[in-house]
């Protein structure tokens, strides 16, 4: 799957959904830094994509960037609230609380 998504990107196709798929794929494969790069691009293309903010935070946390994860989840909360995405809002709130407890 990642190979075909990368091929689309190489052919000049770029979209938030494509970047989200790449980010999720790389995160699932254990490549958090690469996942974070695609997810950052995803939220640049669509700052209201709350699921992408949520996954970006996870990727950054997995890569050891707790501050970056916090920033992503805080921005994601704003996006989720603007669009009434209550599930993403709840999840990111929990992630932030866990991050606070780890400090």
Image (cartoon, helix red, strand yellow):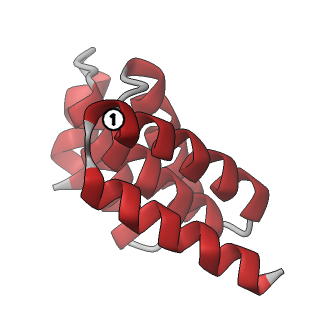
Question: Which residue is the extreme one toward the top?
Answer: 12
Q: At 28% across and 39% down in the image, what residue appears?
A: 6
Residue nearer the viewer, 8 or 97: 97
- Figure quadrant of the N terminus: bottom left
Residue 16 pos. (x, y %): 29, 29
| Residue drawn where x is 67% and y is 47% of the image | 71
Dot 1 falls on a residue whose secondary structure is loop
**Residue 78 in the image: x percent, y percent?**
49, 37
Q: Which residue is mark 1?
A: 49
Q: Nearer the viewer, residue 47 or 35?
A: 47
Q: Is residue 34 left or right of residue 64?
A: left
Please give the name of the residue rendered at 67% of the width and 56% of the height, measured from the top-left corner. 70
Q: Residue furthest bottom?
A: 102
User: Which of these two is toward me, 9 or 86?
Assistant: 86
Residue 4 visible here? yes
Would residue 31 be seen by someone viewing this image from the given angle? Answer: no
Q: Is residue 97 above or below residue 14?
A: below
Q: Quadrant of residue 96?
A: bottom right
Q: Residues within 10 Å of mark 1 (few under 14, many from 20)?
A: many
Quadrant of the image occupied by residue 52: top left
Query: In x, y percent, where is residue 62?
Result: 60, 71
Q: Which quarter of the rendering shows the C terminus?
A: bottom right
Q: Residue 94 appears at what percent x and percent y?
A: 50, 73
């Amino acid at each position: 799957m990642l190979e075909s998504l990368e091929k689309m990107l190489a052919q000049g196709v770029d979209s938030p959904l494509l970047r989200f798929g790449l980010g999720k794929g790389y995160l699932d494969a254990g490549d958090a830094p690469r996942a974070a790069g695609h997810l950052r691009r995803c939220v640049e293309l669509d700052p209201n994509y709350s699921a992408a903010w949520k996954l970006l935070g996870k990727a950054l946390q997995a890569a050891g960037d707790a501050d970056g994860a916090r920033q992503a989840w805080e921005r994601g909360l704003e996006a989720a609230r603007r669009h009434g995405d209550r599930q993403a809002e709840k999840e990111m709130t929990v992630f932030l609380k866990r991050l606070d407890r780890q400090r």
